[in-house]
Amino acid sequence: MDGQKWAESVTAERKAEARGLRRAALRKIGNSFFRSWSYAASGFEKALAYLLAERRGEQGLIWQTAHGKVWKTTLPGALGEDTVVLKRYVGKRRWRHFCVPSPAAREAVNFLMLSSLGFPTVDLLAVGDNRRFLYLRDSFIVTRFLGDGFRDGIVFMRQTPEAGDDALRDSFLSAVLRQLAAMHSVKCLHRTSHPYSFLWRRSGKDAEGVEVVLIDVSSCRFKSARGFDNWVVYDLTKLFRNLRMSRETLKRHMDFYLSLNPGCGLSADRLALLVPTAGSGPGKSAKEAKHAATS
């Protein structure tokens, strides 16, 4: 059952179930604020030891930000020859995670929770923190690399043939909106819903002709129902603000989103007015768009 089907029958009990799954996931990985810890999926223990020894996993850099780096590496034959992705979070504000789960722990928990609810995510293989008492030095997470034709959604933000194919781009956006609407139905906010937070490939099995997978969920949060529509604008702005399209096309996407999340209190016209796109005038940040929704 995919995320949208699960959301169609959502109730207060279902929302409680989602939060319960998140707490259970925290217990499963063995999260601790007082010591270093690590979790490995069954059968992945030796592979994790190999990746962390002498930082062997930090080869083949594929992504880098101010807060972390991402590497893709292939394990040796004795360990299965799987291709995996290692993400290591670093940061200067390390006391920020005093008695708070690290970014890697949050992402692992969200992967487990969303997967249990039927959302398409990558496979979690390992996660861990390097702590000294309450002080977080760094954290890491390992997931299985998705090949088989999957590509990064960032191609729709650049001068690429995919970005120029309006039908393909719209199919990608519809597939992403289907997952966001299901998350929003249980008051779960994505918060980093940029196109590059999703992998995609063409698929004849999916309604939109495109299959998407969530790959960056460390910032997902549950929010209260009060004022949640403003957060909807926040998520949608993250998705659309760097994509070039007409206002009519944007409104069509907003109509599609509302058909999947009828509990949203904003109309398609209001959403199309609040959510910016590339070339639609001065670009508003997600925070600015969210604040505009309250006025």
Image: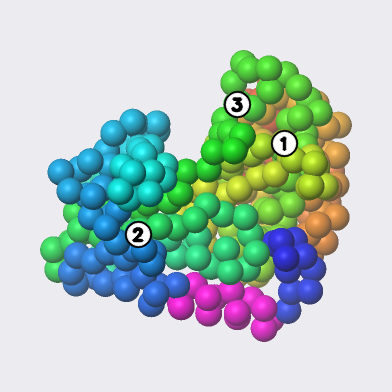
Q: At label 1, which amino acid type do we have? A: Arg
**In this picture, residue 98 sits left or right of residue 292:** left
For discs 1 and 3, the disc positioned in front in the rendered view: 1
* Label 1 CA crowd tier, 10 Å (few <14, some 14–19, many 20+): some
Q: Give the position of the N terminus as an image quadrant.
A: bottom right
Q: Residue at x 71, y 61 (%)?
A: 2
Q: At label 2, which amino acid type do we have? A: Phe
For discs 1 and 2, the disc positioned in front in the rendered view: 2
Q: Position of residue 198 (x, y in %)?
A: 58, 42
* Residue 208 found in image quarter: top right
Q: Residue at x 68, y 22 (%)?
A: 163
Kind of element beneath mark 3: helix
* Label 3 CA crowd tier, 10 Å (few <14, some 14–19, many 20+): some
Q: Which mark is residue 44?
A: 2
Q: At label 3, which amino acid type do we have? A: Val
- In the rendered view, tell whether residue 37 sits above or below residue 216: below
- In the rendered view, tell whether residue 282 sits above or below residue 139: above
Q: Position of residue 23 (x, y in %)?
A: 46, 77
Q: Position of residue 260 (x, y in %)?
A: 81, 57
- Colour convention of the picture: rainbow
Range of magenta residues: 12-24
For discs 2 and 3, the disc positioned in front in the rendered view: 2
